[in-house]
Amino acid sequence: MIKKGDIVHGLITSIIGYGAFVTVDDYNGLIHISEFSDNYVKNISDYVVIGDKVKLKVMDVDEENKQLKLSYKAVNKIRGVKVEVPKFRLGFKTLRDKLPHFIKEELDKEVQDERNTPKL
């Protein structure tokens, strides 16, 4: 019999937008998206995938329906924030540096258009 506060091992059976479903022995459980991290969770697949065996904390038990509310973050604390390091390109030029080039291109286009326009 599983009790609130127990640490259990479960198998991820499916992932949906608001959480992941887990089987623990003969119980079905849900890890709500808010129980994966204290930080914003954009994609649950960043934490688990179908078929993973994970260690979880039982937040609530519905013994009659054999259902569990589970927490991933209570057992698997992830320190820090997941971020992507920005990629910078060398050779950045300001508008002031590029403006003469843009003006020259536009003037060249006008001259070219005038040459290609038939005269009557």
Image: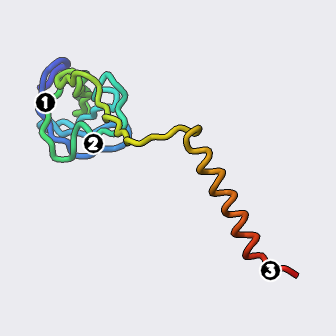
Q: Position of residue 28 (x, y in %)?
A: 22, 37
In the foreground, 94 or 79? 94
Q: Amino acid at mark 1?
A: Lys
Residue farthest along the top direction in this orientation: 5
**Quadrant of the image for the N terminus?**
top left
Amino acid found under the numbered disc labelled 2 = Ser
Q: Of helix, strand and loop, which one carries label 3?
A: loop
Name which quarter of the figure residue 52 lies in.
top left
Q: Give the answer, above or below, for where 90 lies relative to 69.
A: below
Give how far across and how far down residue 55 sits, in percent.
13, 30
Q: Secondary structure at mark 1?
A: strand
Residue 118's disc is 3
Label 1 packing within 10 angstroms: few (<14), some (14-19), many (20+): some
Disc nearest the viewer among 2 and 3? 3
Which of the two residues, 66 or 34, is positioned nearer the viewer here?
34
User: Residue 30, position in %: x, y?
Assistant: 27, 34
**Which residue is rendered at x = 31% and y = 34% of the image?**
85
Distance between the alpha carbons at the discs numbered 3 and 1: 78 Å
Give the label on residue 45, or none.
2
- Earlier-in-chain disc, 3 versus 1: 1
